Each structure stands twice: as C-alpha cells, then as structure tokens.
Image: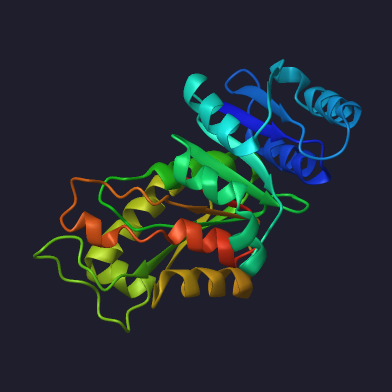
Amino acid sequence: MRWLIVIDGSDRSEAAAAFAAQLVRPGEDEILLLAVQETGTAAELKAEVARVQERFADFAPRTLTGRDPADDAVDAAAGEEIDVVVYGSRGRRGLSRLLLGSVAAHLEHKLPCSLLVVRGEGGPIRRILVATGLFPGRLEQTDLAGRFAGLTGAHVTVLHVMSQMALSESAEGAPLELDAEAAIRQGTREGLGLQERLEYLHSRGIEAEARLRHGLVLDEVAAEIKREGYDLLIIGGHRVPSDLPFAWLLSEDVADEILMNTKSHVLIV
C-alpha cells in the first residue's frame, strides 16, 4: 500500500503520523509526506518533517511540497497512485465548519483513494469498529480491518445498521427484533452478510464479533462508539456500487455526516 501523510507544521499532523505508524509494514508499504505550511514558520515545518521522516526511517519516505492541504493532497493522491491519505483534522464542527470549510470533508469527497482522519492524540489501537452496508462480495472495509488488526492485535466489531431500502427488489430483510446472532442463525440476508465477514476475519486469525442495529446509520454508529469506545472506525465512502439496484437511493453521504458529528478516528474506504 502507498500512504500519503499530510504534514502542516502542527501538533495534529504529527499525531496523525504517529497514529498511522501503527498501521504500516516495512517492506510492503510505501510512505510519502506532503509538507504544506499553513501555520507556524518554515523552520517549524522543516523540523516536523524531519521528525516524521525519522519515525518512518525504515520506509525511506519521500517528501512532496504543496501550498494547500486539500487540493494538493488530492492531486498527489492521483499522481502518485496513493491508497490512503492521512490527515490530522482540526475537528471543526457546526458554524465554524460551515464558514471556514473542512479539509477533511473536501478530501472525503474528492480523493480517489481511502482517507484516514485522525482527531487529536492517537493512542494504541485495541478496538476497531467496521460499519458496513453488507454489499454482497464487497469486503474492502473488512479486509482493511483484518490487516490492521493483524498488525495491532485489535479486536474487530462488524456493525450493520438495517436500512429501510432493500438491496434488491426481491430481498427480504430481517425482522426488526433480530440481533446479529439470530440473523446469522436464521440465514437472513443481513445474517449471511455478517457471517461472510466474520468468517473472513476468523480465517485470518482475527478476534471478531458482529452486531446488528436498527435505526438511522449516523445515530447507531455514534451510539455504538459512545457505548463501547473504539480506537478506529472504518466506514465506506459516499460512492455506492453502481451495479446495485436502486443504488442512487442509497447514496446518502453517511461518511460526511460522521466526519461532522463524531470525534472518532475514522478511515473512509
């Protein structure tokens, strides 16, 4: 995998780099840095770049330069065929976000790759939450959760929030009272999707469990994070597979809502 870490001379970008360091593998991953001076002095930015380069010394990171963390990161991601962009968010919310904009939201919409947004200090990764739409055969989020859990020893929880819209014209959803275990046992569509992901993780030696919730996606994901506490949330982006029936009706931008309304470290795939 190819990673691009945005460095802007702030504590938050250095913390984001430290968090990402848990998720990369020497000999398999490549690290690029994008140095953008938004605050502070050129000397402070240079010093931070040197510290981050030292942290990733085993990867011999290459450093790019830019002037705008949003547009330059998008251009670099495309030009360098990046898999994941890492950004330390300011955490703007509410009116401040509306007036000043959000680099994280811009990246979420424009990047051709995954985005890891780190809020504040990033500690050890012990618990990972994967919020999945259970699209048949689409295991990108689960695959990344397995990869990261293998590196950190984290426990993975696979969460599905039932939608009011069926994934096919003939599909039958699980009754609203079913939990994940019952849905798996009864072989409902949701149960089969959860079972597929658990088997995938267990086959890689990852400790994992499944949960099935009913309600609005944002509300249920936020409640799960508050209830259990997770060190990393992995979700799908706003791009819905075009070969699914009614895909345009399922394309609400849940990722953007989660960015705006939670304080989690989040990987948008």
Residue farthest to the left, as pictured: 170
The colouring scheme, among rainbow, by chain, secondary structure or one colour, is rainbow
> Looking at the picture, how far across and down is residue 87, in whole percent?
65, 42
Residue with the most extreme bottom position: 177
**Residue at point 59%, 38% (across, down):** 70
Establish if 218 lies above or below 119. Answer: below
Residue 259 picture quarter: bottom right
Residue 223, quarter of the rendered image: bottom right
Q: Position of residue 104 (x, y in %)?
A: 59, 48
Q: Residue at x 64, y 23 (%)?
A: 31
Q: Who's the residue at 18% across and 58% down the image?
A: 246
* 11 horizontally vs 242: left or right: right
Q: Looking at the image, how many numbered discs can be counted on the residues?
A: 0
Please say whether residue 204 is visible from this viewpoint. no
Instruction: Pinpoint residue 127: horizontal percent, then vertical percent.
Output: 62, 56
- Compared across the picture, whether 85 is left or right of 21 comes to left
Q: Which residue corresponds to the image point at 22% horizontal and 55% vertical from the top-left?
A: 247
Please tell me which residue lies in front, 217 or 198.
Answer: 217
Pick whichever, 53 or 47, lies toward us. 47
- Residue 96 image-quadrant placement: bottom right
Q: Is residue 64 above or below residue 154?
A: above
- Does residue 97 appear in this view? yes
Residue 48 at x, y = what percent?
85, 31
**Residue 126 higher or lower than 81, as above or below:** below
